[in-house]
Amino acid sequence: MEDTEVKLIPDEALVSMSNMEEVIPTNILEIGAQTKWKKGFSGQEVVIAVIDTGCDSSHPDLSEAIIDGYNFTTEHYGNPENYNDTNGHGTHAAGVIAAAQNNKGVIGISFKSKLLILKVLNSVGGGSIDNLIKSLDYASNWRGPNNERVRIISLSLGTKQSSTELHNAVKRAINNGISVVVASGNDGDGEFSTNEYRYPGAYEEVIEVGAIDQNQKIAHFSNTNEYVDLYAPGVNVYSTFLNQQYAILSGTSMAVPHVAGALGLLIEEHEYKQNKRLSEQEIYDILMLHTENRELNNHNINILSLSKKPFKRKEEIR
């Protein structure tokens, strides 16, 4: 197979900073994560694979969340055990998902989940479809020290060219019961009248995520197309960054970890309530019950909302 390039979804960086006192970022409050925290759910025992630029494994908000990792790039002399981030993008996504509740820095949505860090992108955000496929299969086959398995894959990257091999790797992951969450891309104009596609986001089987701003409008850069399942905060998102710092970034890349983190909470909650392992389709159905349908420019979109009380199925009513 041709070693075609895949890239991180470009983002807009505003500022980086130190932060000593723990805060709950506004973007996390906006999705209602605290409603699940108050019920005692924090994503415990859920493993989320972050396929990206790696992660700052020494960051105080992330070091304890990392259960394992692998470097598929030539960076760090190709050492597969060194998956440290050289860009910042992956560290930022990891923090939105699972930054620790430790009285400093920020808190992530699913703050007791574990992260499998798979580095496929280099310092300038470039990588290959071949390595992306390898990372998807790695996540599907990975087993933790206590036989843990990956339940969610977070993908804030894409390519404009579809690939049969990539599509098949995505389907293998989903067939293994993994929810694959992917950015729609930042090639958009915020208009529903035009469609823009990035892959694997535009594969029907994945959970494709677009970005909204603080006013719950489609972000001006967000791709829109018929495969976008839901929208999440993607403008001025505050999270962890390189060198134990914090940064505000914008992009559909930032929207994806909101959904990945939300899934961590929902899997813990509903597998506890139902006392069984849920299928990928069941998890998707639960996720979509935790969205609010809004009409924008004569189009209906679904916006992530963990605070929404989902409708109960008849069999759940006692």
Image: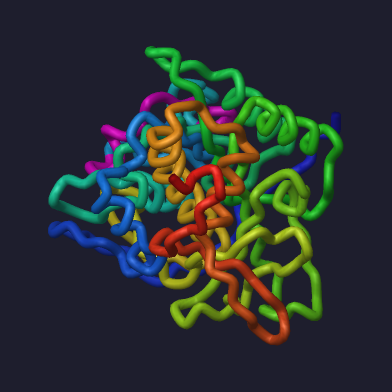
For the point 51% across and 21% down, the residue is: 80
On the image, the x and y values in percent for residue 33 come to: 35, 57
For the point 43% across and 28% down, the residue is: 275
On the image, the x and y values in percent for residue 209 come to: 61, 58
Q: 300 or 153, which lies in front?
A: 300
Visible residue check, residue 122: no
Magenta span: helix, strand or loop, mainly? Answer: loop
Asked if the stretch drawn in magenta spans residue 77, the answer is: no
On the image, the x and y values in percent for residue 119 come to: 53, 35
Q: Above or below — where is 93 with respect to 283?
A: below
On the image, the x and y values in percent for residue 187 come to: 70, 68
Residue numbers of the magenta segment: 59-75
Q: Residue furthest bottom?
A: 297
Q: 30 or 83, which lies in front?
A: 30
For the point 51% across and 58% down, the residue is: 311
Residue 129's image quarter? top right
